[in-house]
Structures are given as C-alpha cells and as structure tokens.
Image (tube, grey):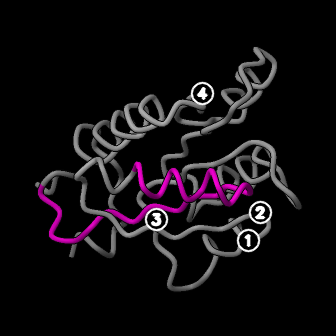
C-alpha cells in the first residue's frame, strides 16, 4: 500500500493567491516546513482552473485564496469539485476572512478545510506546517487508478 509519507516524489502544491507579497511569504513558509514539495503559483481564479485542467497537470493539494481577480475562490472551488477528474484534490481555503458566511459557504461547496490566514509570519508558518503535515503526511489522499498499475 502506498501512503503519503512513502511517496518517492515531492508533493505537488498549487497556490492560488492574488497578493504577490502574501504569495512570497507563503512560499518561504512552505520551505520552512521541511516537507518536500514542488510549488506552482497562480494569481487569479481563472489561472488556477487552467493550471488544474492542463492535460499534464497534477496537484496533491490546492491552497486557495478567497478573494481573487477573475473567478473568486468560491467559483474555483465549485468548478473543481464539479469535475470528476479534479474533485478528489484536497482543497484548503486559505483566507483572511473569518466571516461565518464565508466559512459556511466554503464547506457547503465541499472545501476540505478552511484555514484563517494570519498576518503574523510565525503564525503563518505554523498554519502551513499543520496543513502540510496533515494533508501530505497524515491523511490518505486518493491515488489515480492509472498510477496504481
């Protein structure tokens, strides 16, 4: 049986974050986790969908901002969860919004987790470490049938 911790390749993470400063801080924080990964970054919802729908695309985790130009996080979430080929990708809504309406709507659209993006860098690092530890080392994530052969 293959588990996430027994992968022989780095985890593939797609970060959809429109604020380039925040994206840079997230990139640094992800490196500090010590979890081997390849990071792709996009800065709007339309690019996130295009990146996921690319024929050679593969993502083990999508970190998704809520407020982005083009399609917002809710629209990206709804699109991804509506596509048979994409719906199993774990999606963590990583947002600065603590609005109960936003949190509830994200879960209604089948987000896997909603995490508050904290402005303090050390808290950001702790949050991202927890996300990666859980989704890439602890939780079993689906494996595409063609990769089982």
Q: Residue furthest top?
A: 100
- Residue on which disc 2 sits: 44
* 23 in relation to 98, above or below: below
- Quick one: label 1, few (<14), some, or many (20+) residues within 10 Å? some
- Residue on which disc 3 sits: 59
Q: Between residue 26 and residue 80, name the one nearer to us.
A: 26
Residue depicted at x 48% and y 35% = 124
- Quick one: label 2, few (<14), some, or many (20+) residues within 10 Å? many
- Quick one: label 4, few (<14), some, or many (20+) residues within 10 Å? some
Q: CA distance from mark 4 to mark 2?
A: 19 Å
Q: CA distance from mark 1 to mark 4?
A: 23 Å
Q: Which mark is residue 93?
A: none
Q: Are marks 4 and 3 in contact (CB under 8 Å)?
A: no
Give x and y (percent) for residue 123.
Answer: 45, 28
Say whether residue 92 is left or right of residue 106: left
- Residue on which disc 4 sits: 116
Residue depicted at x 28% and y 73% = 147
Q: Are marks 1 and 2 in contact (CB under 8 Å)?
A: yes
Earlier in the chain: of badge 4 and badge 2, it is 2
Looking at the rendered structure, the number of numbered marks drawn on it comes to: 4
* 113 in relation to 6, above or below: above
- Residue on which disc 1 sits: 47
Query: Circle 3 sits in a helix, a strand or a loop, which is it?
Result: loop
* 1 in relation to 110, above or below: below
Query: Circle 4 sits in a helix, a strand or a loop, which is it?
Result: strand
- Magenta region: 6-29
């Amino acid at each position: 049986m293959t588990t996430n911790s027994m992968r022989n390749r780095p985890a593939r993470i797609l970060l959809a974050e429109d604020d380039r400063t925040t994206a840079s801080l997230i990139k640094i924080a992800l490196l500090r986790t010590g979890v081997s990964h390849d990071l792709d970054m996009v800065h709007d919802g339309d690019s996130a969908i295009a990146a996921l729908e690319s024929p050679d695309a593969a993502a083990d985790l999508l970190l998704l901002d809520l407020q982005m130009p083009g399609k917002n996080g809710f629209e990206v979430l709804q699109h991804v969860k509506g596509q048979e080929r994409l719906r199993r990708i774990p999606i963590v809504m990583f947002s600065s919004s603590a609005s109960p309406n936003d949190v509830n709507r994200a879960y209604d659209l089948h987000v896997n987790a909603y995490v508050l993006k904290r402005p303090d860098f050390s808290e950001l690092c702790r949050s991202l470490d927890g996300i990666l530890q859980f989704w890439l080392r602890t939780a079993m994530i689906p494996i595409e049938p063609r990769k089982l052969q």
